[in-house]
Image (spheres, grey):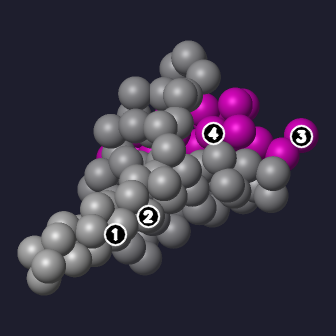
Amino acid sequence: MKALLAIALVIGVAGIALAQERKVDFKPGPGAQQVQASCGTCHSLDYIVINSPFLDRAGWDASVTKMIKVFGAPINDTDAKAIAEYLAANYGKQ
């Protein structure tokens, strides 16, 4: 009985974790690969979709800069520019 209860608990926790993470299908374009490789290393890519209604070009620039300077994301200047441009063009507030 305890083993069955433990299995149910593990399945329940895994189900909650999986339900909160959904696959993000990025729009194709220059910078998409850098976004997936750099941003997805540290956090869920859902954050991009969640924040897209609120961030314009300046907001995405600030967000990418914050990830680098505050959180230490290992993103070079060229990739940072490509990421911000891609996010603003495809997920930016219009």
Distance from Cα at disc 4 to Cα at disc 3: 12 Å
Q: Amino acid at mark 2?
A: Ile
Which quadrant holds residue 14? bottom left
Which residue matches tag 4? 87
Which residue matches tag 2? 16
Relative to residue 6, is residue 40 drawn left or right? right
Q: Residue at x 50, y 58 (%)?
A: 20
**Quarter in which the C terminus is drawn:** top right
Residue 84 position, x and y percent, is 58, 43
Q: Amino acid at mark 1?
A: Val
Kindly check if marks 1 and 2 are in contact, taking CB atoms under 8 A apart as contact: yes
Q: Is residue 6 magenta?
A: no
Q: Earlier in the sequence, mark 2 or mark 3?
A: 2
Distance from Cα at disc 2 to Cα at disc 3: 33 Å
Please determine whether, in this image, residue 88 is positioned above or below residue 11: above
Q: Residue at x 40, y 37 (%)?
A: 36
Q: Amino acid at mark 4?
A: Leu
